[in-house]
Image (spheres, grey):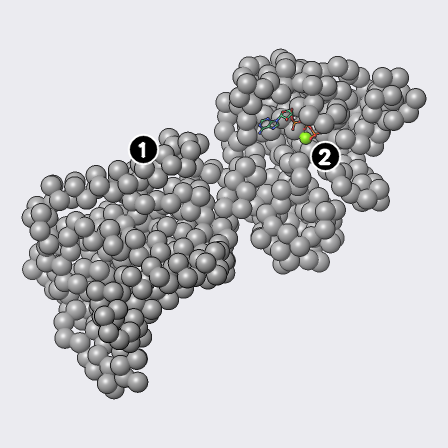
Amino acid sequence: MSAMLEVKDLRVSYGKIEAVKGISFSVGQGEVVCLIGTNGAGKTTTLRTISGLIRPTSGEITFEGKRLDGVPAHEIVTLGLAHSPEGRRIFPRLSVEENLLLGAFSRNDGEIKSDLQAAYDLFPILGERSKQPAGTFSGGEQQMLAMGRAMMSRPKLLMLDEPSMGLSPIMMQRIMSTVKTLQSQGTTILLVEQNARAALKLADKGYVLEVGHVVLEGSGHDLLHSDAVRKAYLGED
Amino acid sequence: MDQFLQQLLNGVTLGSLYALIAVGYTVVYGIVQLINFAHGEVFMIGAFGSLATWTLFFKGQTGLWVLPFMIIGAVLASVAVALLLERVAYRPLRNAPRLAPLITAIGISVFLQEAVRLFYPGAKSALPFPQIDLVTGAAFQVGGITVRRSAIFVIGALVVCAVLLWFFINRTKMGRGMLAVSQDPDTARLMGINVDRIIAVAFAIGAALAGVAGVAQGLQNSNIDFFIGFMAGLKAFTAAVLGGIGNIYGAVVGGLVLGVVEAMAVQFIPGTFGGSPWKDVWAFVLLIVVLVFRPQGLMGARVVDRA
Ligand SMILES: Nc1ncnc2c1ncn2[C@@H]1O[C@H](COP(=O)(O)OP(=O)(O)OP(=O)(O)O)[C@@H](O)[C@H]1O
Ligand SMILES: [Mg+2]
């Protein structure tokens, strides 16, 4: 069986600077796959390219057998691929509920209301403050909103870019256990994380990026216990 | 007192016209951070679209029932021109330096003026605008104040347009999409919003209101010419900046304030600097003063947003 998402020899440049220099990886149906790497390794660039915000210079992106490179970003969502971007990027002057409804913008079915309720069940604070402007939320609350919003498109594959950024350890636990929950409910997840330990613990598979290259790959468990990762990313010696 | 109320009414009337046009500057700016300096011409095209509709289909008619058709004609003409502009002139320049669309807009303005002047029959000089029962004709007196019928049309048009716009932005999915694009276009795309389409909708909304303003202008002044878009556009742009560029309700407030200040200046500033020759000067003085003390405009320059 071929993977749900296949990235092959992907290259992406910003002007003359090549940020992603020919990376390949795959995400299988139902897996949690994580990309880790230092600042500037090209993780965000990779996700933005998959969701169509940036055009690759070369390489292939295939999602459920369909080529994505060249498809406009707003159509990629409708194929079942949601992207919760780095820095959360909630719409600050819209209410929590409006943010969530925007997540369902590509849908026309009659179940949006019940999915809204599902998001409130997943993160009760969103329900309690549904009319509040999202910009007044704390970082952790905004992260929950960003995840809830991404889920509103009913994605088959959810891409999360540093969901734990700037969060307290408790909030980070919360986010990570939500990732596990979403996986158990059938959502495939591509996770980008600075917090390598937390990410690798729950990942089925991991890739380590360095300056635009994949330098290491393996199961979450193997990477967590490999010397290279322990030294470079987990601060152990 | 009567004099004051009279000027207040005149100012609100003028201001309503400015406001209808100003929304077009602000809604486009709020979405793409572009000043469409050809918007005054979109208004002018609306006036001619309305006149053409009447001349082609209803010549000689003065019944009020013709007015909706004239408005539709105006709106269709304005929207068509604005969408065409967006598609062929502005979209290719979306990632160009800011100066490029600005200069393009000036070129388009001159092009549209000349196109109307040369190709609209008789438009080399001013053309009479049809008189319509109930909305033109003898003014009536309320107390000591003269109320022109066209004034009621203009003010009413602004109220109706403002309510419809509020509803569209706050209560429809497309409106919510517009708010999202104005706050964060990239993330809006991740939501499945077609940003190109939203930009076109912003142009169309501004143009529709400018088209209505074109009809209002014709009814008020009883004639129109190819150059009416220049001053009206400049004033409406001033109103948009005055209210806070990007803020729709700011455009409405800015238009009304500007109209009232002009009317009051004509009446109440004595001596050399009073009277109508100076009203434009006072309008721009107001702009400068407001921008010195409140650079974000009266209502605050946020992107397209509920006030
Ligand atoms: N818009 C841009 N223009 C130019 N260069 C960019 C742009 N965005 C990113 N880069 C560069 O591309 C490289 C990869 O950046 P990217 O944001 O993908 O890294 P990252 O792995 O997500 O890093 P971090 O962990 O800090 O988020 C960096 O060198 C960065 O400076
Ligand atoms: Mg990043």
The percent coordinates of residue B40 (x first, y second) are 27, 50
Residue sitting nearer the eye, A34 or B139: B139
For label 1, the residue is: B88
For marks 2 and 1, give the CA distance.
40 Å
**Would residue B61 be found to the left or right of residue B89 on screen?**
left
**Quarter of the render that holds ligand 1:** top right
**Residue pointed to by mark 2:** A162
Asked if B86 appears above or below A18 in the picture, the reply is: below
Callout 1: 10 Å neighbours few (<14), some, many (20+)?
A: few
Taking depth in this image into account, of A216 and B252 the one nearest to the observer is B252
On whether ligand 1 comes within 8 Å of the CB at mark 1, the answer is no
The crowd level at tag 2 (other Cα within 10 Å; few <14, some 14-19, many 20+) is many
* Rendered residue at 64%/47% (across/down): A115
Helix, strand or loop at disc 1? helix
Q: Residue A103 appears in which quarter of the rendering?
A: top right
Q: Is residue A178 left or right of residue B80?
A: right
Q: Is residue B86 left or right of residue A37?
A: left
Q: Position of residue A152 (x, y in %)?
A: 62, 42
Q: Amino acid at mark 2?
A: Glu
